[in-house]
Image (cartoon, rainbow, N blue to C red):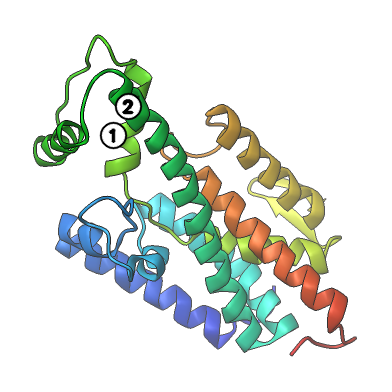
Amino acid sequence: MGRITETVKVLLIVNILFFVGSQFLGEYAYQLFALWFPKNDNFYFWQLITHMFMHGGLTHIFFNMFALYIFGSLLEQSIGQPRFLFLYFSAGLGAAGLQILFSYFTFNSAYQAYLDAGFNPNEIQGFLNEVVASGRYNFYNNVPQDATEALINSYVTPMVGASGAVFGVMAAIALIYPNLPLYLMFIPIPIKAKYFIGGYFLINVYSAITGANILGPSNTAYWAHIGGAIIGFLMMWYWKKNQFNQNRWY
């Protein structure tokens, strides 16, 4: 493992400071800095960036920061600080974009189910406001239960974490160092980066499509992981294809 770069060090410190601060501010921190569904009153444009520094718990931040520590410095040393930062934040934004797109799809489908059941937009919004205020809700006989759950989950569940940005970094590493040997924790068998990272990506695709939680909790934003990985891979592929230098990308 090489020397940790200054950029990665700063990202680690900022993430940790946000996490510690959120423990003191509690729900107020998540209300301000987590990424909420755009139709939710808690949504602010700066959350597209700040959500990358928020985390849901010690396990969440540990694994994200561990992956950033392992892969981030190697990538920055390979492509330089400006491109590393551009890729990192672009992957994070791509992750947010795909997750929001998925949330809109599920929200609109569920919203239509309520309209078809005879609810008007004001009644639906009132229902959502009551859920936000009380945390409780009822199921209606003429609305499928899964539609109610999809409507609420899309509206009230914020997105947090550096996972999308980190997935972009990992995808870039898999492209430029495909045969880099990686080790799973407690398994002393090397796995090439292209298989390790590629397999992890496919697991996330499977979970996103089926809803099955193979790795991670049930509220994992799988589409965000996919979005970040796609942006990181495409960006690195473009740079490698068009501006390759034997020693470094600038």
In this rendering, position of residue 123 left or right of residue 64: left
Vertical order, 157 against 11 (above or below): above
Specify the quadrant of the image occupied by residue 130.
Answer: top left
Say if 110 sits above or below 44 in the image: above
Q: Is residue 240 above or below residue 215?
A: below
Can you identify the residue that label 1 sits on? 152
> Residue placed at 36% from the left, 69% from the top?
50
Of residues 78 and 237, which is closer to you in this image?
237
Quadrant, the C terminus: bottom right
Going by the numbered disc 1, the residue's amino acid type is: Ile
Q: Residue furthest right?
A: 246
Task: For mark 2, give the secondary structure.
Answer: helix
The local crowd at label 2, few if under 14, some if 14 to 19, many if 20 or more residues have their Cα within 10 Å, is: some
Q: Residues within 10 Å of mark 1 (few under 14, many from 20)?
A: some
Q: At 50% across and 80% down in the image, what residue appears?
A: 9
Alpha carbon separation for disc pair 2 and 1: 5 Å
Secondary structure beneath dot 1 equals helix
Give the residue displayed 68% in from the left and 87% down from the top.
80
Camera-side residue of 131 and 25: 131
Disc 2, disc 1: CB below 8 Å?
Answer: yes
Answer with the quarter of the image where residue 109 lies.
top left
Q: Which mark is residue 149?
A: 2
- Say whether residue 38 is left or right of residue 166: left
Callout 2, which amino acid?
Answer: Glu
Q: Residue at x 72, y 52 (%)?
A: 197
Judged left or right of residue 100, residue 75 is: right
Out of 53 and 97, give the one closest to the viewer: 97
